[in-house]
Image (cartoon, grey):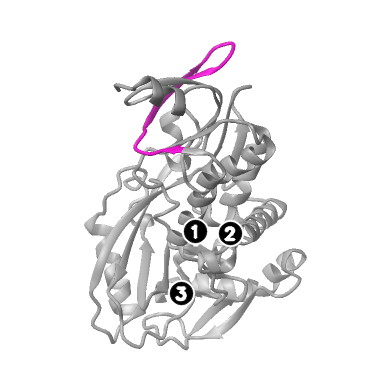
Amino acid sequence: MNFSYWEYKSWLSNIDYTIVGSGIVGLNAALHLKTKHPKATILVLERGMLPNGASTKNAGFACFGSLSEILDDLKSHSEDEVLELIKKRVAGLQLLRENLGDKTIGYKPWGGYELFLPQDKALFQECISKIGAVNKLLKPVFKDAVFSEGSNNFNFKNVENSLIFNQFEGQINTGKMMEALLHKVQSAGIKILNNVNVLEYSENNTSVKVKTEHFEFNTQKLVIATNGFASKLGIDNVKPARAQVLITKPIKNLKIKGTFHLDKGYYYFRNIDDRILLGGGRNLDLKGEETTELVQTDLIQNRLEQLLKETILPNETVEIEQRWSGVMGVGDQKIVIVKKLSDKVSCGVRLGGMGVAVGSLIGKELAEIS
């Protein structure tokens, strides 16, 4: 790239910290680093025009796990590990709300619901039978019962008559959240460069050389917060997981209010601006959805439309207005990776689809070790 002297001196010289990724984790890491080191020069690099992974693509659930997800986690994690995961999600959500304010992020404490399709009857019965045990497990965190059995007051079709209600779940406006975070970061004097794709980095005795598609530069410390794209920078044990989403046109007299989960969290929907936002379905093709390609597939989109028309709004004429995809970072374990890769390089990745919940906290933890 043909930089002038002024451009290079102002944007790419004497960089103390370079953060790769301007999502929830990257921006929170930048803010905490600026608090720790007020005189430091901090640069954030973002591969997209906007944060291009999951931070601006998600459904805006302020959640910490549905009952079936928690029961599923308990089959592969110890009770202590599951409790620690939930504590981190709750603490992260609280930090997000404190940092930006409920009004700013459009936080609505409307609760969450889990629905069960007819083929999931065994799962439904297991969940109903385990409500008491899981509430007991979570009591130290919430000081109250989290889950309860409720009625299908939303007239959903082709599901079990009972829903499982989570009184502590809420929803946010993802766009407002990221807009506020970006404003806060830029107001703190932190530079952000968009459309910069980092290809690789190398270390020497004094600094880290960062190579992008268009230019190279040196930084004292490198902080990687690319989540689902982490493997592109050589970080192991993180796989991309594409999440496909659609949103309807406005629906008159929409009565649905809250956040909703189906099939162990593989499907999810909510109300927003008199519309229904619906996403998920990667379990239909788990291997195929291990990709960073931000496109949609007929297999998953057709299933989302089927759920919308047969279960969620069976008596409505519904039109789809928009479709998109985001990329999460997942692995064999749901424990987030926050670690130093070397003395000069650290990473915070593999958020497991819980970026809204844990992103603020992981950004803080990442800054503390960087």
Question: Do labels 2 and 1 touch, CB within 8 Å?
Answer: yes
In this view of the protein, which residue sits in the foreground, 22 or 139?
Answer: 22
- Which residue corresponds to mark 3? 116
Q: Is residue 98 above or below residue 252?
A: above
Looking at the image, tell me whether mark 2 or mark 1 is earlier in sequence order: 2
- Which residue corresponds to mark 1? 177
Q: Quadrant of residue 188?
A: top right
Q: CA distance from mark 3 to mark 1?
A: 31 Å
Q: Secondary structure at mark 2?
A: helix
- Which residue corresponds to mark 2? 100
Q: Which residues are magenta?
A: 192-209
Q: As shown in the figure, which amino acid type bears the numbered disc 1?
A: Met
User: Residue at left 45%, top 71%?
Assistant: 120
Q: Is residue 288 above or below residue 142?
A: above
Q: As shown in the figure, which amino acid type bears the numbered disc 2?
A: Leu
Does residue 336 appear in this view? no
In the rendering, at what x and y percent does residue 4 appear? 34, 21
Is residue 1 left or right of 239 when viewed as pictured?
A: left
